[in-house]
Image: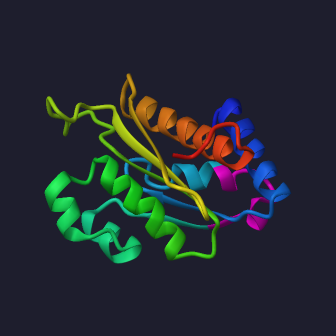
Amino acid sequence: MFPAQLAARAEQLLDACRARNIKVATAESCTGGLIAGCLTAVAGASDVVERGFVTYSNEAKTEMLGVPGELIERVGAVSEEVSRAMAEGALENSAAQLSLAVTGIAGPGGGTADKPVGLVHLSCALEGSATEHQRCVFAGDRNAVREATVAAALDMALAAVTGQRAIA
């Protein structure tokens, strides 16, 4: 179902989390659950994946993750601030120690000069550390943007878990 390179990344992340007794939660908007789907496509993922939140609407971001509606109104759902709040809300509303959050514009429409199609904000929260954020603009059609987002999120989480990069 997922390309081999994504499945391999998911397996690496699961193994790294398992070795450190870390549970994972996802909070997804533009990927609609693909990150959780990629992780759970790996046999045995149930001992690491705690839950996934698909928060496609602004209301879901607020109701399920506690993202302030005022924040979404002020900066927009596709923003650094909202992706960070999503990641932190996923930790607060789960038994996980690590969360991944993504919000973006997968296209083909919906982009603006300030927020073009392909813009994605990714955040990773690891219990006891500052929440990490990345802003990416991915090329390609809707499927390419979503696949690239999954890959970037898995890489970000793996780096956080293994300490390959400091979370700041």
Quadrant including the N terminus: top right
Residues rendered magenta in the picture: 39-50
Residue 110 vs 14, above or below: the answer is above
Whether 145 is drawn above or below 28: the answer is above
Which residue is painted at 29% across and 47% down in the image? 79
> Could you say where residue 148 lies in the image, as x and y percent from the top left?
50, 32
Left or right of 37, for residue 57: left
Based on the picture, tell me whether residue 44 belongs to the magenta stretch. Answer: yes
Q: Is residue 8 above or below residue 22?
A: above
* Total marks in image: 0
What residue appears at the point 63 percent right and 76 percent down from the top-left corner? 95
Towards the viewer: 48 or 124: 124
- The picture places residue 76, in percent across and down from the top left corner, at 20, 52
Task: Look at the image and say whether residue 48 sits in the magenta stretch.
Answer: yes
- The x and y percentages for residue 50 are 65, 69
Quadrant in which residue 69 is drawn: bottom left
The residue drawn where x is 70% and y is 65% is 23
- Look at the image and name its color scheme: rainbow
Q: In which quarter of the image is residue 22?
A: bottom right
Q: Residue at x 65, y 36 (%)?
A: 6
Residue ranking furthest to the top: 139
Q: In this view, does 106 lie to the left or right of 40?
A: left
Horizontal side of 128 relative to 72 (left or right) equals: right
Q: Position of residue 117 (x, y in %)?
A: 27, 32
Please state if 127 lies on the left or on the right of 29 as rendered. right
53 or 17, which is in the foreground? 17
Give the image quarter of residue 155.
Answer: top right
